[in-house]
Image: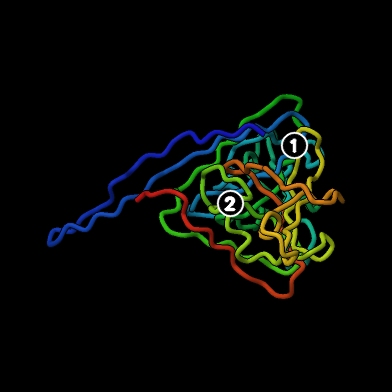
Amino acid sequence: MKWKTLLAIPMLLAATAQAQVNSVNAVGMVKINIPANKLVFVSLPFVTETTTLDSVIGDQLTGAGNSGSSDRITIFNTTTQSYESFWKVEGTNTSFDDKWYKDDGQFPPVAADVSILLGAGFWIESRNGSDQNLIISGEVPSEDSGVDLVEGLKQIGFPYPVAVNINSPEFMLNDIAVGAGNSGSSDRIIIWDIVNQSYTPLWLVEGVGNPTFDGFWHFDDGQFPPTKADIEIGPGVGFWFERRATGNGTWTPTKPYLWP
């Protein structure tokens, strides 16, 4: 996937007449390439004022007069451990145009009621014959940001608009993930390979007593000794986290930049 952080604009906010109290926010944008007729796994690395699809995605991507032809956004519901899909109405010359709706076969279509939060991952399915660009924007997190994890599968992303290597100290998913001496028992990260349209699963080695392996993510490819994964996740890129450990938790990587 091609990604690019486009903009970070410091904005001075307000002061009172009695005492000047300034706070500084930065607005950022990430441009993500959506190849023609491909599945792309993206995430939201910004804080947004509203969290609906119509505000986070808005009038982007390519809609249609029917759900079978429109680009789709698909989100995994962690409660039901199942998918929910949404489509964009376009070209009907009605008040429904340029908005997102549930892909549930209802007519008239039902407005999308899903929320996209900081650190959430989701699928974009392009049904367009041409490449597109998706712009995701919002406030750059100014404090350490947490992503809630659940037992089972969840779509997530690094909650800051920067690139990060999964085995770097900044990634810090190791702090809450539970590793093991075998890939069948470890929590897993599952990366989407946009070129091959296939998954690359990773597992966290723990407890083998070798500092070369313990505490690092490795390819879940059956190799012995395991191969350490050297994968960089770009801003706005989503991935699966499969929690095989019991119970929920929160992943809170330290903000990897000095601002503010």
**How far from the left and from the top, in percent, is residue 166?**
63, 49
Most extreme residue toward the top is 130
Label 2 packing within 10 angstroms: few (<14), some (14-19), many (20+): many
Quarter of the image where one finds residue 116:
bottom right
Inter-mark Cα distance, 1 to 2? 18 Å
**How far from the left and from the top, in percent, is residue 117?**
57, 57
Most extreme residue toward the right is 222
**How far from the left and from the top, in percent, is residue 236?**
59, 43
Residue 250's place in the image compared with 99, above or below, is: below
**Residue 107 appears in the figure:** no
List the residue tagged with mark 2: 158
Mark positioned earlier in the residue sequence (1 or 2): 2
List the residue tagged with mark 1: 194
Instruction: Using residue 14 as the reference point, say whether residue 154 is left or right of it.
Output: right
**Residue 195 appears in the figure:** yes
Tell me what residue is drawn at x 51 percent, y 36 percent. Answer: 5
Say whether marks 1 and 2 touch (CB < 8 Å). no
Q: Pick the residue in front: 110 or 123.
A: 123
